[in-house]
Image (cartoon, helix red, strand yellow):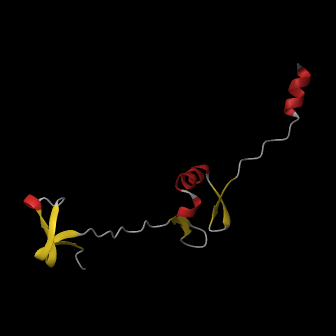
Amino acid sequence: MSELIKAIKGLPPLKPKVHTVNIQGQSVVVSLKKKLEVMQHGEDAYHWVSAIEFALKPKPKKLTKYPTLQKSSKGYIFKDGDVHWPTSITEEGYAWRRKPE
């Protein structure tokens, strides 16, 4: 039993774990908390702010424009005002148009 204790005491000390992330091709040593954050968002979601600091990329703004039903010189006539039931195309009807900015 004493030989086992001597062998355990004779082992070299453990090296501390080094956490690295790869941001835009550059490997950086970070803390465990920052490593977990980068793993959650993904390495591609980060960019360099300065030579020694990186941060999340800003999310792109959504610019989706949806068409609305507007009066038009040529457009649809709807049965009983139901937009899902067009009956014909005539002059001075309704058309789906996107509002210009």
Residue at coordinates 92% horizontally, 23% vertically from top-left? 3
* Residue 19 to residue 3: above or below: below
- Residue 44 image-quadrant placement: bottom right
* Residue 64 to residue 73: above or below: above
- Left or right of 2, for residue 90: left
Q: Position of residue 85 (x, y in %)?
A: 17, 59
Q: Position of residue 17 (x, y in %)?
A: 71, 48
* Residue 38 to residue 26: above or below: above
Quick one: 47 or 3, which is closer to the camera?
47
Quick one: 18 or 99, which is closer to the camera?
99
* Residue 73 to residue 85: above or below: below
| Quadrant showing the N terminus | top right
Residue at coordinates 85% horizontally, 30% vertically from top-left? 8
Q: Position of residue 46 (x, y in %)?
A: 54, 64
| Quadrant showing the C terminus | bottom left
- Left or right of 60, for residue 32: right
In the displayed orientation, state which residue is furthest to the right.
Answer: 3
In the displayed orientation, state which residue is furthest to the top.
Answer: 1
Residue at coordinates 89% horizontally, 21% vertically from top-left? 2
In the displayed orientation, state which residue is furthest to the front.
Answer: 88
- Residue 27 image-quadrant placement: bottom right
Quick one: 48 or 58, which is closer to the camera?
58
Residue at coordinates 13% horizontally, 58% vertically from top-left? 82
Number of marks in picture: 0
Quick one: 25 or 7, which is closer to the camera?
25
